[in-house]
Image (spheres, rainbow, N blue to C red):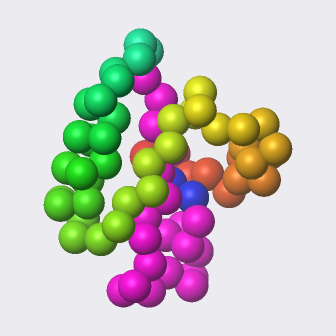
Amino acid sequence: MFGSVTRSDFTSDSDVDLVVDFSKPIGIEFVDLADFLEEKLQRKVDLLSFKGIRPAFFNTIQGKIEYV
């Protein structure tokens, strides 16, 4: 997790930013996972894959990721 969900500025209107790592590509199931998480968490989920993050963005969030 990263973003406001890990900070004190998280509100009822905030989305949940998640980075996931898979041992192999999962294809369309990635979208299914995002939909499942949104349903369970009852809020918007921004789901990213470690392999899909641009290096510059990863450098920005790297120290702010909370692993769960």
Residue 40 versus residue 14 in the image, above or below: above
Q: Is 14 displayed left or right of 57 in the figure?
A: left
Q: Is 45 displayed left or right of 7 in the figure?
A: left
Q: Is residue 32 visible?
A: yes
Q: Is residue 15 magenta?
A: yes
Residue 64 versus residue 3 in the image, above or below: above
Residue beneath the point at 26% across and 60% down: 38
Q: Residue 47: x and y, percent?
A: 44, 48
Q: Is residue 45 magenta?
A: no
Q: Residue 45: x and y, percent?
A: 38, 60
Q: How many marks?
A: 0
Residue beneath the point at 41% across and 13% down: 24
Q: Residue 59: x and y, percent?
A: 80, 45
Q: Residue 20: x and y, percent?
A: 46, 37
Residue beneath the point at 61% across and 51% down: 65
Q: Quadrant of residue 44?
A: bottom left
Residue beneath the point at 31% across and 41% down: 31
Residue 49 versus residue 4 in the image, above or below: above
Q: Residue furthest top?
A: 24
> Magenta segment, which residues?
3-22
Q: Quadrant of residue 42?
A: bottom left
Residue 41 versus residue 46 in the image, above or below: below
Q: Is 65 displayed left or right of 43 in the figure?
A: right
Q: Is 1 displayed left or right of 64 in the figure?
A: left
